[in-house]
Amino acid sequence: MVKQRIIEEASELFARSGVKGITMDDLARHLGISKRTIYENFKDKEELLTACINAFHEEYQAFSQKVFSEADNVAEAIVTMLRKDAEQASQRQVNVMDEIRKYYPQVHKEHLTGFHAKCDKFGLMIKRGMKEGVFRENLNPDIIVHFFLLKVEDFSHHNNYLNRFSFTELFENLAITFLRGICTSKGLKIIDQYKEKVNYHTHENTI
């Protein structure tokens, strides 16, 4: 339980203030425990960072599987996933990815360079959408996927620029615009219905 709590709180602090900006002393004070307790669970900051990244991957994978098992179609599932990605990007206060790449290159190499794996998974989603009739049948999935993920990687590495914009702006201008460009009329209706549903719930929660 202590180890899990350290991972959860460290993940939050890293996302808010950056990996470099948070020391083990800072984390110990935040948790109200001794630094020795942290080192009994993690030999150093790099091992803790790796544990945080692994925990994030596990959580995201579980969320992804849930979304795709419950969604009526692949278009709605992709919108939900991209919405989560855009929301996370807009909430970051610092460019954590750049910090990890610069100060923890081995961690970045071993745990954050999964571009080809992402391409394969996203490619399967696009092909499924083409079969379902929500994406245009004349698409080349390899080109679509490679281009889109390159842009996502590019934007994720320039959060200082993205911080100028709200989550809604990011989501509407990046994810929705991209998806509408590859959708059939059936897919466009699904996206518009999804947006109405999300906007309704958002409005309902503010009443």
Image (spheres, rainbow, N blue to C red):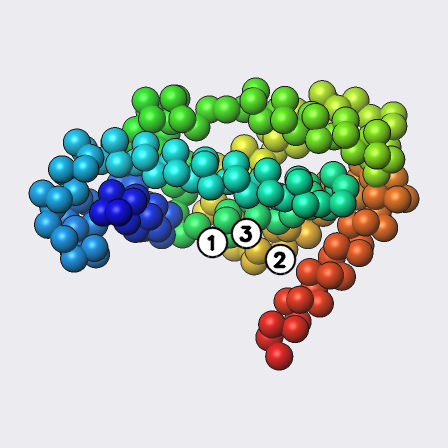
Which residue carries the number 3 mark?
87
Which residue carries the number 1 mark?
91
Q: Nearer the viewer, residue 23 or 11?
A: 11
Q: In terms of secondary structure, where does tag 1 sit?
A: helix
Mark 2: few/some/many CA within 10 Å (<14, 14-19, 20+): few
Q: In terms of secondary structure, where does tag 3 sit?
A: helix
Query: Mark 2 or mark 3: which is in front?
Result: 3
Which residue carries the number 2 mark?
168
Task: Indicate the quadrant where residue 104 lies.
Answer: top left
Identity of the residue drawn at 69% across and 60% down: 198
Residue 22 visible in the picture: no
Identity of the residue drawn at 32% across and 32% down: 50
Q: Earlier in the sequence, mark 1 or mark 2?
A: 1
Identity of the residue drawn at 84% across and 47% down: 188
Residue 181 horizontal side relative to residue 69, left or right = right
> Is the C-beta separation of discs 1 and 2 under 8 Å?
no
Q: Does residue 32 lie above or below 40 as drawn? A: below
In the picture as drawn, the residue positioned furthest to the bottom comes out as 207
Q: Quadrant of the C terminus?
A: bottom right
Residue 40 visible in the picture: yes
> Is the C-beta separation of discs 2 and 3 under 8 Å?
no
Q: Does residue 117 lie above or below 157 as drawn? A: above
Rendering coords of residue 196 (x, y %): 76, 61
Q: Does residue 70 lie above or below 61 as drawn? A: below
Q: For the residues marked 2 and 3, what is the alpha-carbon distance in whole angstroms?
A: 8 Å
